[in-house]
Image: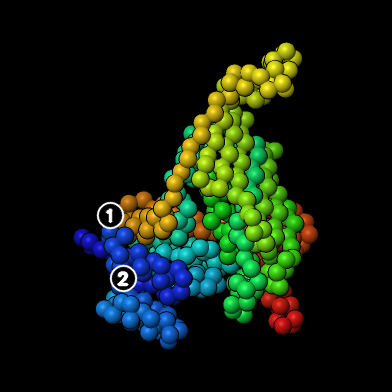
Amino acid sequence: MMKKVRLGITGFGAQGSTYAGFIADGKVEHMEIGAICDIDPAKREAVKEKYPNVPVYADYIEMLESGDVDAVVTCVPHYLHPEMGIQALERDIHALVEKPAGVYTKQVRELNEFAATKPELTFAIFFNQRTNPLYQKIKEIIDNGEIGKLRHTNWVITTWWRPQGYYDQGSWRATWEGEGGGVLVNQAPHQLDLLQWITGMPKKVMSNVKYGYQRKITVEDDVTAVLDYGDGATGVFVTCTHDIMGTDRLEILGDKGKIIVDDSKKVTIKRLHTPEAEMSDKMDMQDVMKIFMGQGQDEVYSEEVLEFGSVWGEQHTNVLENFALNIIDGTPLVAPGSDGIYGVALANAILLSSWLGKEVDLPVDEDVYFEELNKKIAEEKENN
């Protein structure tokens, strides 16, 4: 049986070099660096200097066919994730695709469908926040029915402040052609995934999106989306890249309780002793007045507060180790690759609603989205 998975790293940028460092430092028990690939000669030289015993490639196909790697992670621009995933799986190389799985669901669906033809291979996506004990705990509480049937979600996640200089680093940044979008595809994919992972996919989306609102870019830098889960349940998702003071607050309301998450560190769980609808039907006005006056709260609900610490990099190494163990002994994946389509679908729906100026159904019409995206790319080229 394989003892260590030889990982091929495509792209030696911020993420690729970080993962290489984790593995080289022994933080991923069942993984070693098999090879590293980058099209930039300077980065290849940097690899040779830092990891002299690691094979280096300029062409990722050559790396996949070298015999040096058992698996690959795609630390490359978003548009390339599906293509590289397919090329790896086609050569019987296990694939760990970075988030987002792609820019539009049509290309992600092609990846998922191809991966389904290779069930013997491991196909995963790098949703490291799914290994965060805080979000695992929230999902467990909701799955167990502790706060009852979903009524409302509200996530304000504006901790993505990026100055103009960040966008000016490269002409491909924050463009429809280069990245396929802004905050929704670059900064917030983890939250979009967590939202659907924990509370399920909405049925409809209506959005108000600003493009180049506070930055000199063509893509979205300010988003407010209203989600319709069906059965009356609703949600609001707010994100942007221009709030230097930033807020990260998630609220999930059910008919039997409420979960509040502050700064992805503190969780407050309020559990009603009696379901809200039953209280509404049976409570007399004397008891109601007590609540209005701030009395007798303990008789209405219990409150539990949980604090979670975070070791930088631990979530990433957990995903890498989980991926390796799935290859070695079939340990269940925290984030199966096929799950990557949901967050992309949600981002696509938010943008499409804005482009069409109306509420859209999920799943979105993939052909319509692709057509509208290409219009944005064409407009961008004309204006540059």
Q: Relative to the observer, which residue lies in front, 24 or 70?
A: 24
Residue 143 location (% of width, % of height): 50, 37
Residue lying at 58% horizontally and 54% vertically, measured from the top left = 192
Is residue 348 visible in the rendered image? The answer is no
Q: For the residue marked with disc 2, what is the amino acid?
A: Ile
Q: CA distance from mark 2 to mark 1?
A: 19 Å
View extreme (front): residue: 245
Vertical arrangement, residue 255 with respect to residue 375, above or below: above
The circle on residue 353 is none
Determine the residue located farthest toward the bottom in the rendered image: 41
Residue occupying the far left of the picture: 1
Residue 206, relative to residue 55: is it above or below?
above
Which residue is label 1 attached to? 329
Q: Which residue is mark 2?
A: 33
At horizontal 59% and vertical 34% (from top left) the residue drawn is 258
Tag 1: residue type? Asp
Element class at badge 2: strand
**In the rendering, at what x and y percent does residue 52 appear?**
28, 80
The image position of residue 288, as x and y in percent, is: 72, 18
Q: Left or right: where does residue 149 sit relative to residue 118? A: right
Snapshot quadrant of residue 269: top right
Answer few, some or many: residues within 10 Å of disc 1's Cα (few below 14, many 20 plus, some between 14 and 19).
few
Q: Quadrant of the C terminus?
A: bottom right
Residue shown at 71%/78% (left/top)?
380
Residue 318 position by quadrant: bottom left
* Direction from residue 185 to residue 119 in the image, left or right: left
Quarter of the image with the N terminus in it = bottom left
